[in-house]
Image (cartoon, rainbow, N blue to C red):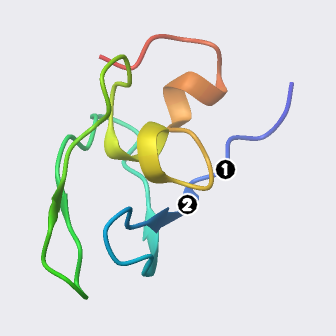
Amino acid sequence: MTDVVLESILICPSCGANTSCIMPTDACQFFFQCGHCNILLKPKPGDCCVFCSYGSVKCPPIQQGNSCC
């Protein structure tokens, strides 16, 4: 089994800014405010969290083959 990656780079769809984040292992992160353009990111339809929609790495539960929420 592959180790779970906890760091993900969120890429803002509005301005393209990259923000390095440590993902929570015990909850979904549904919102994230871009520090560059201040847009509030929410998951795309069908995704459980902002990391699954805009991150370089999916959230820990999805990496492990589980459902997130």
Dividing the picture into quadrants, the one containing residue 62 is top right
- Residue pushed farthest bottom? 36
Residue 52 in the image, given as x and y percentages of width and height: 47, 37
Q: Residue at x 45, y 51 (%)?
A: 54
Residue hosting label 2: 8
Residue 1 in the image, given as x and y percentages of width and height: 86, 24
Image quadrant containing the C terminus? top left
Q: Residue at x 62, y 48 (%)?
A: 57
Crowding at dot 2, Cα within 10 Å, few <14 / some 14-19 / many 20+, comes out as many
Residue hosting label 1: 5
Residue 47 in the image, given as x and y percentages of width and height: 38, 24
Q: Residue at x 17, y 50 (%)?
A: 31
Q: Are marks 1 and 2 in contact (CB under 8 Å)?
A: yes
Q: Is residue 65 left or right of residue 11?
A: right
> SS at mark 2?
strand
Q: Which residue is more in the foreground, 6 or 52?
A: 52
Q: Is residue 29 left or right of residue 68?
A: left
